[in-house]
Amino acid sequence: MRFQNRVVLITGSAAGIGAGCAQVFLDEGARVISLDRDQTALEKWLESLVPAQREQVWPIVCDVANTAQLQNAIQSGIQSFGRLDCLINNAGIHPPALTIAETSLELVEQVMRVNFIATFAASQAVVEELKKTRGTIINISSMTAVLGQENSTAYAASKGAQVSFTKSLALELARYGVRVNAILPSNVDTPLMRTWAASLPDPEAALDRVARLQPLGRMATPDEIGKIALFLATEDSSFLTGQAIEADGGAALDY
């Protein structure tokens, strides 16, 4: 098992990419500190696990938008398992499709707080622990960071901030053997994606359109992103840091 006796902390882990990452890591022997603001979803996800894996999860209800709550939750999780080997900053929100004129500054601040400031705060909270284990930070960004997305300026900007942060922090932590990388999915079939589609006039047509944006003809599954995260968290990627891995099914090739 590739992550046996090691610990990963995942934000937004009760559904979507976060749950996909958690399952992949659990299958490889990891212990998982699972943070999510939705207690019901977190409990439902835990119930879906086999009992042996359920015992390897430390669930914490936490709203990453509250940085003090986030950092306290992280410290609680680390104390519970006694170490940390990987942080996956996954929690995120995608507001409804809005023009820039329709986008309030309050919404911009909310999106930045969840999608970027929480990434910064969580990384800040784990740096000293990761120096001990020569661990990794993985930021779940988005292809919108490099390609843009119409009527999603706040979201795309927040994801772009994650990529810039990834590169700068990788430079800062390389001397300690801590690697920092980002994954940029294009379209993944998650609750977040379906919520975004529901804000459009024809949700099903929107989902079909985004699936066809990939030359592979479909969206990614959450566990496919989880497998990339596992690669970045293990020695298999020991010479990769500061990279923004474009997990886009070839979408950028025809952009």
Image: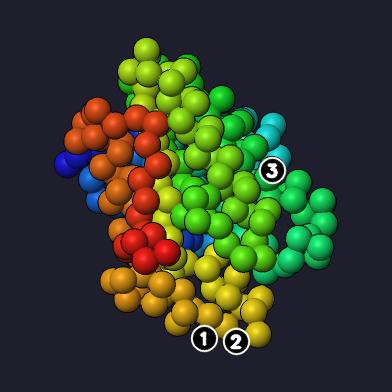
Q: Is residue 241 left or right of residue 35?
A: left
Q: Residue at x 72, y 67 (%)?
A: 98
Residue at mark 1: 205
Q: Mark on residue 113?
A: 3
Q: Quadrant of residue 121?
A: top right
Local crowd at mark 3 within 10 Å, few (<14), some, or many (≥20)? many
Task: Please state, as top left, top right, bottom left or bottom right, where the N terminus lies in the image.
Answer: top left
Q: Quadrant of the C terminus?
A: bottom left
Q: Are marks 1 and 3 in contact (CB under 8 Å)?
A: no
Check disc 2: other Cα within 10 Å, few if <14, some if 14-19, many if 20+: few
What secondary structure is found at the residue carrying circle 1?
Answer: helix
Q: Residue at x 37, y 51 (%)?
A: 246
Q: Is residue 250 above or below residue 27?
A: below
**Between disc 3 and disc 2, whose residue precedes?**
3
Q: Position of residue 148 (x, y in %)?
A: 55, 57
Q: Do the residues under discs 2 and 1 have CB atoms within 8 angstroms?
A: yes
Give the number of the mark in front: 1 or 3.
Answer: 1
SS state under label 2 = loop
Q: CA distance from mark 3 to mark 2?
A: 29 Å
Q: Mark 3 or mark 2, which is nearer to you?
A: 2
Relative depth, front residue between 89 and 8: 89
Residue 208's spot in the image, x, y percent? Answer: 45, 82
Q: Count numbered badges in the picture.
A: 3
Residue farthest top in this picture: 175
| Residue found at x 39% / y 31% | 242
Q: Nearer the viewer, residue 205 or 100?
A: 100
**Amino acid found under the numbered disc labelled 3:** Arg
Is there any visible trace of residue 218 in the rendered image?
yes
Residue type pointed to by label 1: Ala
The residue identified by callout 2 is 202
x 50%, y 56%: residue: 147
Kind of residue at badge 2: Asp
